[in-house]
Image (cartoon, rainbow, N blue to C red):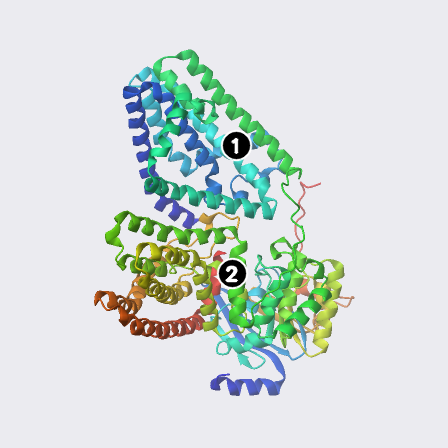
Amino acid sequence: MTSEALPFRRASEVAGDAIVVEGLTKEFRGTKAVDEVSLRVRRGCFFGFLGPNGAGKSTTIKMLTGMLRPTAGTASIEGWSIEEDRLAIKRVIGVLPEELPLYERLSGEEYLQFAGRMYGLGRESTKQRCDELLEFLSLAEDRGKLIVDYSLGMKKKLALAAALIHNPRVLFLDEPLNGIDPVSSRVVSDLLKSLARKGVTLFVTSHVLDVVERLCDEVAIIDRGRVIAQGTVDELRDRRSHGEDSSLEDAFLRLVAADVERRDLDWIG
Amino acid sequence: MRERAVGLVLALPGLVLFGALGALIAYFGIRAASVHRPELLLPLISIAATGFGLFWVLSPVLAGVAFSETHDVDRLLHFPVPVHVLVVSSLLANLTQPMVLAEIPLVLATAAATAAGRPAAFLPCLVAVVLSMLFVLAAAQLAGLALQSAARNRRLQDVALFAGLVVSFVLGLAPLLILLTGAGALGPTLRRVLELDLFALSPFSWGVRAAVHAGRGEVAAAVTLGLAAAAATGVALAAASVLIERMHRGEMSLGPPAGARSRPARMLSGGPLGALLEKDLRVAWREPALKASLLLGLLGPLIFLIFLLQLGPRARSGGGILLLASLVGLSSFGANAFGLERRGIALLLAFPVERWRILAAKNLAGLAFRAPGLLTLLVAAPLVAPAAFVIPALCIAAITLALAAAMDNYASILFPVAVPAPGRSPHAASSGARGFGAAALGAVLLAGALAVSAPFVLLIWLPPLLEAPWLWGVAVPLALLGAGAAYAMLVGGAARLLERREPELAARILGEA
């Protein structure tokens, strides 16, 4: 821990926020992919970060996890500054990136053991957690197979297992249920809910809005790099409802102006 | 797109030069054979055409290129276009490839040489040579499709890629070995092959043989062989059509199923440094191109060793082996450690491990990849130097290996080049103009590595220079200690640089991988 980081950490801990983002901005060749995003995610919250394709969700996660340097703004995870305390942050977070950068020439079991060692776990606890995670995520039978021979869903589950093996306090999950079969999807959803109950903070992006509606305590919607709404799922639904039963999907579509009438393609059909 | 264009512009002078050189060799070779040994012209031109054709057909494998990228007509199969139209259009599209266009001078020169100065014979000769070239392209297309069907099985693809790279390495070493052993043994075999004209059976030769007959005014033989070459091209295209259709229907999955179960393997080493080293070694051993790079580490030391052996007794004073040791050591430069991670860089940098550990593990893995070179040194040392030089030579190798690897960390951080994934074209690396920056910085850093290791290497050179070998007892430990301290300082500096530039490093590699 650096001495400069101390006051910031204490202030944030008092507030009880696991993630604090202030004016986070990322520009690529003059185009703002993320534009002054500010968020507060309280500890133990299941937080959904929604937005259309290219809205800036993954860029925000990459900045928060130290993979991308922000053009402007600040952020802290569990009180650690993303600029000053990258290594400290990496000890307390688990990341499931959208693109699954796995070492494909390791077997699933080798990969999990490697991840455990890299997080500083001992030989015995690595082995025990590895066995339990593989069993829990139905990967035990394929533990010896090289990852290159895994299906997308298996890779996703393995990457999730690696993100969990060190018992992180904050989890960043980019499309965690994408490509996973319905049975595993339910298992993973239940696991994530139980983690939130145990005080783990979850920062999740997803395109599957009914899953977000079912799992998340709070939601932020980002569009063209800017956060355009934030609150509980009920608040977002109520804010945008027109008297009838409104779903999160209806609210989302109205917020990102995606429910405009489109001309029919007359020549089809 | 822009980087591809830049790449093409940069490659163009080389292609033109090689094209012109090939054309000159072909023209004067054919003319010389026609004048001095006309009876050997047909066998010789058949051998040359077959060699050219086989090399062309196998070049994707020899270069470690991915099968799936060679002839990917597969993507077009869902359009309502007959398969044979796709195959022919792919062949025609191949005619406009830079590599094919670069052969135009060779085709023209061969036609001109076989026409033997008769302008009326030039056109028929040209048609015959073009038929030969068309067969080469059709055969390459067919081979590409066969390789693509092999690529559907990952294990088979790995084995084939590695085998191809080994064959390529052996072919590269062949001229050197022939020079070393003398070409005498090959003479009688070559004479027998020429007498029997065995390569007349090769379809690669039919077109050029037709050109020779056309140049001599032997119309019947020229027409017969020309038709045979055209028929061979037709057969190759038909076979390609059948292959594509079978692949599309999923009837061409070669080898055992990809899902065959392998036995469990556990990571053996403890701690982040050991885990990183073990990960790098396991991944390298299972990736055909990386595994084949172990062989490349042998090439430099072997060439130098052969050179030393050719010099005879005067090279065996010991100085040669110390030079060889430096050469082996400096070979650890250019490891591109982070580029080899490809998308895994996001994973690697996500771990809360001190950055000096990551660099040290990468350096250790790099040293392990140089093991064949070190082994060559160990085996060669007693042959080309007095026994007392063995340990000093190994120490020089260790010092230069470590310091070159330490300097190379800076290049790996500042100018990483994402290496294409296994099975992707090695030409897919899109470093573009940045490659020049990497090369320039690499040259500066290599000079730096030489400068940093020079005092310690000199310390080990001193005892033989002073003709006081007993001084090695002091000089070797001193040099090792000094080099160790220099290595620690260099890695410390590189670790601080890595901490500062992590996001840029990740963004650059992820952008390319």
Residue type at mark 1: give it.
Answer: Ser
Q: Residue furthest left?
A: B466
Establish whether labels 1 and 2 are both on one chain. yes
Q: Is residue A62 left or right of residue B1?
A: right
Is residue B128 visible to the viewer in this orientation of the structure?
no
Q: Residue at x 35, y 72 (%)?
A: B480
Q: Residue at x 45, y 63 (%)?
A: A30
State the SS at label 2.
Answer: helix
Quarter assignment of residue A235: bottom right
The label number, if any, that marks residue B89 in the structure image: 1
The answer for which chain carries disc 1 is B
Residue A166 % position (x, y): 62, 74
The answer for which chain carries disc 2 is B
- A62 vs B369, nearest the viewer: B369
Disc 1/disc 2 C-alpha distance (Å): 44 Å
Q: Nearer the viewer, mark 1 or mark 2?
A: 2
Residue type at mark 2: give it.
Answer: Leu
Residue that numbered label 2 is attached to: B281
Q: Are marks 1 and 2 in contact (CB under 8 Å)?
A: no
Sequence order check, earlier mark of 1 and 2: 1
Is residue A54 visible to the viewer in this orientation of the structure?
yes
Q: How many labels were placed on the picture?
A: 2
Residue A117 % position (x, y): 58, 71
Residue B332 % position (x, y): 39, 60
